[in-house]
Amino acid sequence: MVASKKTARAPRRAAAPAAPAVAAAPAEVPAHVDLGVRLKQRRLEAGLTLAALAEQAGFGKAYLSRIESGQKVPPIGSLARIASVLGIEAASLLTDNAHAQQSWRGVSLVRHADKRPTVMGGSAFGYDYFALTDATTDRALQPFLFTFPDKVDKFVFFEHEGEEMMHVLTGRVEWQVGGDKFILEPGDTLHFDARIPHRGHALAGPATALVVIYSPVGYHPNLA
Protein backbone atom coordinates (compact mmCIF):
# COMPACT_ATOMS: atom_id res chain seq x y z
CA MET A 1 0.00 0.00 0.00
CA VAL A 2 2.11 2.84 -1.22
CA ALA A 3 1.91 6.00 -3.37
CA SER A 4 4.68 7.56 -5.42
CA LYS A 5 5.52 11.25 -5.10
CA LYS A 6 5.11 11.81 -8.79
CA THR A 7 1.80 10.06 -9.27
CA ALA A 8 0.53 9.66 -5.71
CA ARG A 9 -3.03 10.68 -5.20
CA ALA A 10 -5.01 11.20 -2.06
CA PRO A 11 -7.02 8.08 -1.26
CA ARG A 12 -9.43 7.77 -4.15
CA ARG A 13 -13.11 8.41 -3.57
CA ALA A 14 -15.33 5.84 -5.23
CA ALA A 15 -18.46 4.06 -4.03
CA ALA A 16 -18.12 0.41 -3.04
CA PRO A 17 -19.72 -1.36 -0.04
CA ALA A 18 -17.59 -2.87 2.70
CA ALA A 19 -18.66 -5.68 5.03
CA PRO A 20 -18.34 -5.19 8.81
CA ALA A 21 -16.04 -7.42 10.86
CA VAL A 22 -14.37 -7.67 14.25
CA ALA A 23 -11.69 -5.05 14.82
CA ALA A 24 -8.02 -5.75 15.33
CA ALA A 25 -6.20 -3.62 17.90
CA PRO A 26 -4.52 -0.55 16.35
CA ALA A 27 -0.76 -0.40 16.26
CA GLU A 28 0.85 1.67 18.99
CA VAL A 29 3.99 3.76 18.84
CA PRO A 30 6.67 2.10 21.00
CA ALA A 31 6.95 3.76 24.40
CA HIS A 32 10.71 4.19 24.04
CA VAL A 33 10.36 6.45 21.01
CA ASP A 34 10.99 10.07 22.01
CA LEU A 35 7.77 11.08 20.30
CA GLY A 36 6.64 13.81 22.70
CA VAL A 37 9.79 15.88 22.37
CA ARG A 38 9.75 15.69 18.58
CA LEU A 39 6.06 16.51 18.41
CA LYS A 40 6.40 19.58 20.61
CA GLN A 41 9.38 20.79 18.60
CA ARG A 42 7.48 20.44 15.31
CA ARG A 43 4.40 22.14 16.78
CA LEU A 44 6.44 25.13 17.91
CA GLU A 45 8.20 25.29 14.53
CA ALA A 46 4.75 25.42 12.90
CA GLY A 47 3.77 28.30 15.18
CA LEU A 48 0.80 26.44 16.67
CA THR A 49 -0.37 26.44 20.26
CA LEU A 50 -1.30 23.18 21.90
CA ALA A 51 -4.97 24.15 21.74
CA ALA A 52 -4.79 25.08 18.04
CA LEU A 53 -3.13 21.82 17.02
CA ALA A 54 -5.55 19.78 19.11
CA GLU A 55 -8.57 21.49 17.58
CA GLN A 56 -7.37 21.12 13.99
CA ALA A 57 -6.45 17.45 14.52
CA GLY A 58 -9.77 16.71 16.19
CA PHE A 59 -8.42 15.86 19.65
CA GLY A 60 -8.75 17.37 23.11
CA LYS A 61 -6.00 19.68 24.34
CA ALA A 62 -5.41 17.47 27.39
CA TYR A 63 -4.93 14.39 25.19
CA LEU A 64 -2.33 16.14 23.04
CA SER A 65 -0.60 17.49 26.15
CA ARG A 66 -0.22 13.95 27.51
CA ILE A 67 1.37 12.85 24.23
CA GLU A 68 3.90 15.68 24.33
CA SER A 69 4.75 14.98 27.98
CA GLY A 70 5.28 11.27 27.28
CA GLN A 71 2.31 10.17 29.38
CA LYS A 72 0.29 8.94 26.39
CA VAL A 73 1.29 6.78 23.43
CA PRO A 74 -1.12 7.34 20.51
CA PRO A 75 -2.24 4.87 17.86
CA ILE A 76 -0.49 5.27 14.51
CA GLY A 77 -3.68 6.57 12.90
CA SER A 78 -3.96 9.38 15.45
CA LEU A 79 -0.32 10.29 14.90
CA ALA A 80 -0.94 10.50 11.16
CA ARG A 81 -3.79 12.98 11.75
CA ILE A 82 -1.58 15.18 13.94
CA ALA A 83 1.26 15.11 11.41
CA SER A 84 -1.15 16.05 8.61
CA VAL A 85 -2.08 19.26 10.45
CA LEU A 86 1.62 20.06 10.93
CA GLY A 87 2.30 19.44 7.25
CA ILE A 88 4.98 16.85 7.96
CA GLU A 89 5.51 13.14 7.42
CA ALA A 90 4.32 11.22 10.48
CA ALA A 91 7.32 8.92 10.12
CA SER A 92 9.57 11.84 11.03
CA LEU A 93 8.06 11.81 14.53
CA LEU A 94 8.92 8.14 14.99
CA THR A 95 12.47 7.88 13.76
CA ASP A 96 15.72 9.77 13.54
CA ASN A 97 16.00 10.36 9.79
CA ALA A 98 19.78 10.61 9.95
CA HIS A 99 19.97 7.24 11.65
CA ALA A 100 17.59 5.68 9.15
CA GLN A 101 19.68 6.84 6.23
CA GLN A 102 22.83 5.45 7.82
CA SER A 103 21.26 2.03 8.41
CA TRP A 104 21.69 0.77 4.85
CA ARG A 105 25.09 -0.78 4.14
CA GLY A 106 24.01 -3.09 1.35
CA VAL A 107 22.40 -5.48 3.82
CA SER A 108 19.83 -5.09 6.60
CA LEU A 109 19.16 -7.55 9.40
CA VAL A 110 16.16 -6.94 11.65
CA ARG A 111 15.66 -9.39 14.53
CA HIS A 112 12.17 -10.64 15.32
CA ALA A 113 11.86 -8.30 18.33
CA ASP A 114 12.94 -5.24 16.33
CA LYS A 115 9.88 -4.77 14.10
CA ARG A 116 8.64 -1.23 14.39
CA PRO A 117 5.42 0.61 13.43
CA THR A 118 5.71 2.69 10.28
CA VAL A 119 3.43 5.46 9.11
CA MET A 120 2.23 5.01 5.53
CA GLY A 121 -0.61 6.30 3.40
CA GLY A 122 -3.17 3.95 4.90
CA SER A 123 -2.25 4.57 8.54
CA ALA A 124 -4.95 7.18 9.06
CA PHE A 125 -7.52 4.71 7.72
CA GLY A 126 -6.82 1.84 10.11
CA TYR A 127 -4.09 -0.04 8.22
CA ASP A 128 -1.12 -0.85 10.48
CA TYR A 129 2.40 -1.36 9.08
CA PHE A 130 5.49 -2.78 10.78
CA ALA A 131 8.72 -2.33 8.84
CA LEU A 132 10.65 -5.56 8.35
CA THR A 133 13.87 -3.86 7.28
CA ASP A 134 15.87 -0.76 8.12
CA ALA A 135 16.37 -0.16 4.41
CA THR A 136 13.19 1.73 3.50
CA THR A 137 14.51 5.17 2.58
CA ASP A 138 15.16 5.35 -1.19
CA ARG A 139 14.76 1.58 -1.58
CA ALA A 140 12.44 0.32 -4.30
CA LEU A 141 11.56 -2.90 -2.44
CA GLN A 142 9.76 -2.44 0.89
CA PRO A 143 8.47 -5.33 3.05
CA PHE A 144 6.01 -4.90 5.91
CA LEU A 145 4.10 -6.94 8.44
CA PHE A 146 0.61 -5.65 7.80
CA THR A 147 -2.50 -5.67 10.00
CA PHE A 148 -5.86 -5.07 8.32
CA PRO A 149 -8.64 -2.88 9.68
CA ASP A 150 -11.98 -4.56 10.40
CA LYS A 151 -13.80 -2.25 7.98
CA VAL A 152 -13.01 0.41 5.40
CA ASP A 153 -14.47 3.72 4.31
CA LYS A 154 -16.66 2.84 1.34
CA PHE A 155 -15.29 5.83 -0.58
CA VAL A 156 -11.56 5.28 -0.02
CA PHE A 157 -9.24 3.41 -2.40
CA PHE A 158 -5.45 3.58 -2.84
CA GLU A 159 -3.45 3.64 -6.06
CA HIS A 160 0.20 4.36 -6.88
CA GLU A 161 3.08 3.37 -9.11
CA GLY A 162 4.60 -0.09 -8.70
CA GLU A 163 3.42 -3.52 -7.65
CA GLU A 164 2.37 -5.24 -4.43
CA MET A 165 2.50 -8.80 -3.19
CA MET A 166 0.44 -9.88 -0.20
CA HIS A 167 0.91 -13.22 1.59
CA VAL A 168 -1.72 -13.78 4.28
CA LEU A 169 -0.33 -15.09 7.58
CA THR A 170 -3.32 -15.13 9.92
CA GLY A 171 -7.07 -14.56 9.70
CA ARG A 172 -9.25 -14.03 6.64
CA VAL A 173 -9.18 -10.99 4.38
CA GLU A 174 -11.40 -9.47 1.73
CA TRP A 175 -9.18 -7.57 -0.69
CA GLN A 176 -10.41 -5.58 -3.67
CA VAL A 177 -8.38 -4.71 -6.77
CA GLY A 178 -10.38 -2.67 -9.24
CA GLY A 179 -13.75 -4.35 -9.64
CA ASP A 180 -12.50 -7.74 -8.39
CA LYS A 181 -12.87 -8.92 -4.78
CA PHE A 182 -10.84 -11.77 -3.32
CA ILE A 183 -11.34 -13.73 -0.11
CA LEU A 184 -7.86 -14.59 1.18
CA GLU A 185 -6.94 -17.12 3.86
CA PRO A 186 -3.63 -18.04 5.54
CA GLY A 187 -1.16 -19.21 2.91
CA ASP A 188 -2.89 -17.36 0.05
CA THR A 189 -0.81 -14.88 -1.98
CA LEU A 190 -2.07 -12.01 -4.10
CA HIS A 191 0.16 -10.07 -6.52
CA PHE A 192 -1.24 -7.03 -8.30
CA ASP A 193 -0.48 -3.84 -10.21
CA ALA A 194 -0.65 -1.07 -7.59
CA ARG A 195 -1.84 1.44 -10.18
CA ILE A 196 -5.23 -0.28 -9.97
CA PRO A 197 -7.36 1.15 -7.11
CA HIS A 198 -7.20 -1.24 -4.15
CA ARG A 199 -8.23 -1.70 -0.53
CA GLY A 200 -9.35 -4.42 1.89
CA HIS A 201 -10.28 -5.42 5.40
CA ALA A 202 -10.23 -8.32 7.83
CA LEU A 203 -13.14 -10.74 8.05
CA ALA A 204 -14.40 -12.13 11.38
CA GLY A 205 -11.38 -11.20 13.47
CA PRO A 206 -7.81 -9.87 13.25
CA ALA A 207 -5.75 -10.65 10.15
CA THR A 208 -2.11 -10.11 9.25
CA ALA A 209 -0.05 -10.48 6.08
CA LEU A 210 3.45 -10.09 4.74
CA VAL A 211 3.18 -7.25 2.23
CA VAL A 212 6.00 -6.49 -0.17
CA ILE A 213 5.74 -3.25 -2.10
CA TYR A 214 7.84 -2.52 -5.16
CA SER A 215 7.88 1.21 -5.87
CA PRO A 216 10.18 2.27 -8.73
CA VAL A 217 10.41 5.78 -7.27
CA GLY A 218 11.47 4.50 -3.84
CA TYR A 219 10.00 5.22 -0.44
CA HIS A 220 7.21 7.72 0.00
CA PRO A 221 4.87 7.94 3.01
CA ASN A 222 1.76 7.97 0.80
CA LEU A 223 2.38 4.39 -0.25
CA ALA A 224 -0.58 2.28 0.80
Image (cartoon, grey):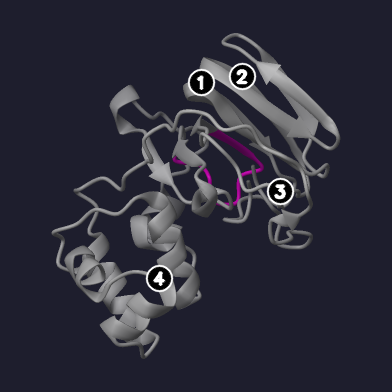
* Magenta run includes residue 138: yes
Q: Residue furthest right?
A: 179
* First reached walking from the N terminus: tag 3 or tag 1: 3
Asked which secondary structure carries label 1, the reply is strand
Q: Which residues are magenta?
A: 134-143
Asked which secondary structure carries label 3, the reply is loop
The quadrant in which residue 82 appears is bottom left
Q: Are marks 4 and 2 in contact (CB under 8 Å)?
A: no
Task: Measure the C-alpha gap from mark 1 to mark 4.
Answer: 30 Å
Tell me the number on the disc at residue 58: 4
Q: Is residue 202 above or below residue 27?
A: above
Tell me the number on the disc at residue 40: none
Q: Amino acid at mark 3?
A: Phe
Q: Amino acid at mark 4?
A: Gly
Task: Measure the C-alpha gap from mark 2 to mark 1.
Answer: 18 Å
Q: Nearer the viewer, residue 126 or 221?
A: 126
Q: Are marks 2 and 1 in contact (CB under 8 Å)?
A: no
Task: Measure the C-alpha gap from mark 3 to mark 2.
Answer: 18 Å
Task: Measure the C-alpha gap from mark 3 to mark 1.
Answer: 23 Å
* First reached walking from the N terminus: tag 4 or tag 3: 4
Q: Which residue is mark 1?
A: 204
Q: Which residue is mark 2?
A: 167
Judged by depth in the image, the label closer to the viewer, 2 or 1, is 1
- x and y percentages locating residue 172 in the rendered image: 57, 17
The quadrant in which residue 83 appears is bottom left
Q: Are marks 3 and 1 in contact (CB under 8 Å)?
A: no
Tell me the number on the disc at residue 158: 3
Task: Measure the C-alpha gap from mark 4 to mark 2.
Answer: 35 Å
